[in-house]
Image (tube, coloured by chain):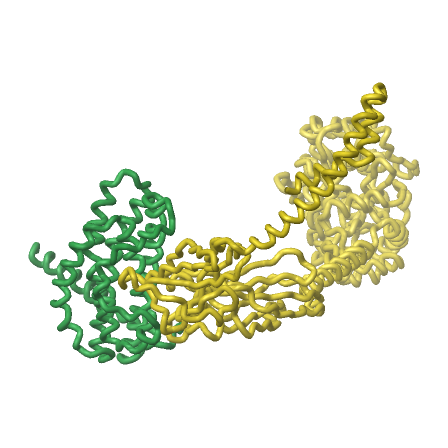
Chain colours: A green, B yellow
Amino acid sequence: MRQVSVLFLVLVCLDLEYRITSAPICAHGDAGCHLLSVSDLFDRVIQHSNRMHSLSSDLHSEFEKYFLPVRNQIGRATRKCHTSRILTPNGKENAQRTDREELTQVILRLLVSWMDPLLQFHQSVAHNEELSNFSRNKALELSDMVHELKNGVEKMAEKMQLLGIISNSLNGLFPAEASLSSSASNEARHMRDYELLRCFQRDSDKVQNYLKILKCRIVPEHGC
Amino acid sequence: MSFLFIGCRWFTKDSLVSFSEAFSSKPSVLEKSLKRAERMKEACGAKCVLFLLFVQTWLVENAGHTSPGKPVLLRCRSPEKETFACWWQPGSDGGLSTNYSLYYTMEGSREDAVHECPDYKTAGLNSCYFNKTYTSLWITYTISVVAQNALGNKSSDPMFVDVAYIVQPHKPENISAELRTQDQKPYLMVKWDPPHKADTKSGWITLQYEIRLKPEKGAEWESHYAGQQKQFNVFSLHPGEVYLVQVRCKPDHGFWSEWSSTAYIEIPDYFRPRDTSVWILIAVLLSVCIFLILAWTVAIKWNRIKSYLLPPVPGPKIIGFDTQLLKSGKSEDLLNALGCQGFPPTSDCEDLMVEFLEVDDSDEQKLVMNEGEDDLEGRVKSSGNDVDKDSGRGSCDSHTLLLEVSNSSTKTYAQVGGNSNNKGSVKLSRKSSTNGKLLSFETAGEKTNTWPTANSPFLLARQSSCYNISKIHREASSLGNKADMHGNTSSTQSKSKECRELHSTVSGDQETWFADEKHAPLLPFKSVEYVEVQKLNQQSMLILKPKTEGHKSVPPEFIGQEYTKVSGVVSDRVLLLLRDTGAQGSSNTQEGENQAVHPSLQCQVGKMVGTFPASPAPEGMQLAASGYVDTAALLQSF
């Protein structure tokens, strides 16, 4: 009896799981459904990056208030961001000239390179007693957001590769990035918090911009 | 320098005069000072003038000969995130021609890689324009302006610029406002285009919009945030006014553009009367008016409506009983209509209430009938007049009818022995008065009749029965006595006495008519008592049965006088009456007196069944030729 009940429970769970996972988002045919889901993914990812960017902007301005009372100092833009090595298109034409795969790759690179520094930032903020609770909470959110965004973009890239929207030349670049990011993160340790935040603010803006360009290139119907 | 000049000028004549006035006390000193001042003035004036001239020329020569003032960078803006421009405000130029130059350095490049502004013209005066080539996003520009003239130069404070964050687009274009209706409500649909230079198609810039509108004569603007869409619906509008609409835009992180050009739209007035609430109000008022009118008419005609809707319930009806016939007094027709076969009514008409008895023989029936008819007619008439129009008001057994009939009957008179000539039947008539009635035994058919009586009438009934019996006795005793014996209600006691006498006299006698001592306690002021006429048996005998149960019913109206021939009395208060009168009856009775039992006489009354003994007092029984029994004779005999 016990075996039977256990088996029954297992079956039920499986069945539920099956139901949950196999529930289709759209009722149309396969091709339409996939494209639709890519668009949804894009929207979600862009929303996420938007939130991330606004958070970083707020934090940056707050940190500047605390730690840099005098504005427009000459020595302000002294340090380079650790991500300056990553070649990113810095204009519209440049961005439009960049193909999808590379753009996706750039995004991913940026996100990956920020994961460790933000973790460090998280730790330093946690111990920082000068910050208000509100700022601290916002700062602590940041690393998680980057992580989530990175995962989202990866999923989206996989989907696009699956659908043939982008080629499969992406995967080859990732192992090479790991070494870059580690050296970069070493550099990032030496930066002060507000500098870090400034760099991150910029990079999140880049990411958001690139995502929007990608979206309007791949699925231009929705809000472009 | 100017002070000197002023100082020289100060000593004018006026001041001197005023000064002298002040010190008028010492004229000698004043005069001296005045003179001195005049001399000084003369000397001073020339010197002052010369000196001033010299100073002024010197000043003029050295006006532009300073280093320029510090210029101030006002702002840098990018309209589409592809180019940008900066503006500065020049400081004082130091009197010399000053030129301004803008220098910038870019982040990531070497420190000494200073570049100068590529374009000073495009953006206007005191501006620097960077075109696409020179614009790089996500790079911090360090910009400063240097003012330079012959004497020196002055550099402004640097400004750090990241082009991605200084975007301020141009104002939206092609703004249009259109009036539309939805469910009879007007709304404004505002449409616009983004500034043509901002590239939203490729996703390079995403713009958010804001609308504001106000009535032409209004004071404040009403703002609405429209998000990223390029149209917007405005609902809260006042009809009959001209509205001004404007739109502006902003990138994700950047600056708001200027307000676009105004679009004018007029809301026409005709939307207002289509408000359905007006129609609803009108409908409500109409319905209220109609309701009031209906209520008024109903109130006026209520009685009619009530009689129409709720007709009065008719009472039970006697089939064939025509009130009109009753009124007309044709008793025969009436009775025929009632369905009785001839007169007297047979046993079929048991249900009918006919107030006369017929106990005589068939020969004399006619006579009796004739006599009775006359009386009956009169009685019928009299009674008919007082009977209610609706014959259905009462039934045979209904109390009301009997009561009414009894009440309304006219005064009949007792004819005791009055008609002894004509009939061989004892005529027991009834006198009716307001208070009570005498029940008269009238000829009746074989039917049962009840004579319910009211209290005093009940009393009277009993008493009247007593009285009747006493009458009978008297009649028997004194034939030819044509005393009109009226039963008076006032003399109930006398009646009772008579009754008692009657009873007492006849108590002991079996042949007495009434010999019931049981009656004594029942006399007379006690419960109701009345006589019930049982069936008339085939031997033409009327069998009476007094009812001692105390029925309270109204005595019926006697219509007419009829005479009954009493044949004998049973000990148990049973009065035996003969149906047939006349010689035959008398002869019969005469014969019956002698005989112990008259075959025709039978007592079949309820419990009181007894055989009729032979009348032992033949001498008491003075039967007239007509066959009447003079009960009085009987009484006297005992």
The answer to whether residue B187 of the structure is visible from this angle is yes
Q: Quick check: B415 above or below A29?
A: above
Residue A40: x and y, percent? Answer: 32, 69
**Where residue B276 appears, x then y in whole percent?**
67, 65
Quadrant including the C terminus of chain A:
bottom left
In the rendered image, residue A184, in percent from the top left (x then y), is placed at 17, 58
| Residue at the (23%, 51%) spot, across then down | A191
Task: Tell me the residue at 74%/30% (across/down).
Answer: B506
Q: Is residue A100 toward the left or the right of residue B154 in the image?
A: left
Q: Nearer the viewer, residue B432 or B309?
A: B309
Visible residue check, residue B498? no
When asked about the image quadrant of residue B550, the answer is top right
Comparing B249 with B223, the one in front is B249
Q: Residue furthest top?
A: B25
Q: How many marks?
A: 0
Viewer-proximal residue, B225 or B32?
Answer: B32
Q: Is residue B88 left or right of residue A70?
A: right
Looking at the figure, which quarter contains the N terminus of chain A? bottom left
Residue B444 image point, x, y percent: 77, 51
